[in-house]
Image (cartoon, rainbow, N blue to C red):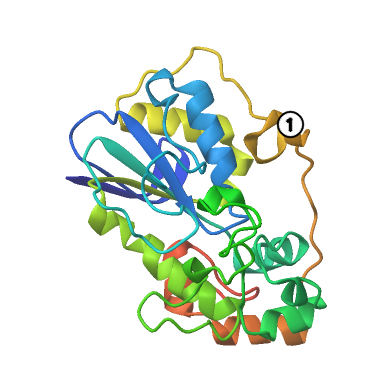
């Protein structure tokens, strides 16, 4: 197994490792609003060998490698699968989660931003992609994919959820022999560079002409993607966020609170 960190051919990565075999499929992991749909669509659109890779739609036997936004729970992690893992900077991720709080309980989703940050995290089964029939006994029930996988408890707030989910996503490097960890900001800033890196690092042929993904969430039916400029956090909220986060974990991902630097 070979590992490369930080940069390769000008494209920044958190970490990259290969199994020594050419991947036959990929699967993208990452928390909601972290660019997982964009990364998946870029690879299926530009690299023919990955075109049939499973996305976030549930198959006849459930999620192929677990819920992509959840804690790792795949039955197996074959060397033929390239795990792609996406992370996003805390401040913009939190703003995006407040704007589009996928699966959050209605009373949580309705809170003002400052209260949203500090509230106990609570989500529900509100999508048939979880394999639950609309109107069935489990429909609208609590989504246990978002509870602590060991204790079964709800997370104290969204920052506790992020700490735990990030630890889970980082563990994918120990599970998949081929694993690439990236930042949302780098993929969205240079999507062609991302495709080129995957192609060259993992020996996968790509189309000669780059095919951009312009649709929101990589799905044409959802319309064209328009970037959102989020307001910076208020000083009190910013201080709260970084007091709750694991700074060593965030530093490993390449994120620091504004004004902080590391030698």
Return the x and y of residue 185 as percentages of the image width and height.
60, 50
**Label 1: few (<14), some or many (≥20) within 10 Å?**
few
Return the x and y of residue 263 as percentages of the image width and height.
44, 71
Residue 212, placed above or below residue 150: above
Which image quadrant is residue 93 in?
Answer: bottom right
**Residue pictured at 75% horizontal, 36% vertical:** 222
**Residue pictured at 61% horizontal, 78% vertical:** 121
Which image quadrant is residue 151 in?
Answer: bottom left
Q: Is residue 194 visible?
A: yes
**Residue pictured at 36% horizontal, 62% vertical:** 170
Q: Is residue 234 visible?
A: no
Q: Quick one: 48 or 76, which is closer to the camera?
A: 76
* Residue beneath disc 1: 221
**Residue pictured at 77% horizontal, 82% vertical:** 114
Q: Quick one: 9 or 138, which is closer to the camera?
A: 138
Residue 67, placed above or below residue 146: above
Return the x and y of residue 203 as percentages of the image width and height.
30, 25
């Amino acid at each position: 197994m070979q590992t490369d960190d930080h940069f390769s051919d000008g494209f920044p990565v958190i970490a990259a490792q290969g199994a020594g075999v050419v991947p036959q499929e990929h699967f993208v992991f990452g928390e909601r609003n972290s660019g997982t749909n964009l990364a998946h669509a870029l690879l299926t659109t530009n690299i023919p060998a990955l075109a049939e890779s499973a996305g976030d739609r549930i198959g006849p036997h459930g999620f192929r490698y677990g819920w992509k936004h959840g804690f790792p729970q795949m039955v197996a992690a074959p060397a033929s699968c390239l795990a792609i893992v996406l992370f996003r900077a805390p401040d913009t991720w939190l703003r995006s989660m407040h704007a589009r709080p996928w699966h959050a309980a209605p009373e949580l989703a309705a809170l003002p931003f400052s209260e949203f940050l500090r509230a106990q995290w609570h989500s529900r089964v509100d999508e048939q992609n979880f394999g639950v029939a609309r109107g069935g006994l489990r429909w609208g029930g609590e989504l246990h994919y978002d509870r602590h996988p060991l204790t079964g408890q709800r997370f104290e707030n969204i920052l506790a959820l992020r700490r735990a989910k990030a630890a889970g996503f980082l563990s994918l490097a120990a599970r998949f022999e081929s694993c690439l960890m990236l930042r949302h900001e780098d993929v969205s800033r240079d999507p062609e560079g991302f495709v080129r890196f995957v192609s060259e690092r993992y020996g996968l042929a790509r189309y000669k002409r780059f095919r951009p993904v312009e649709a929101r969430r990589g799905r044409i039916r959802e319309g064209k993607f328009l970037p959102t400029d989020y307001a910076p956090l208020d000083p009190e909220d910013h201080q709260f966020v970084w007091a709750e986060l694991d700074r060593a974990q965030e530093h490993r991902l390449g994120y620091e609170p504004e004004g902080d630097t590391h030698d």
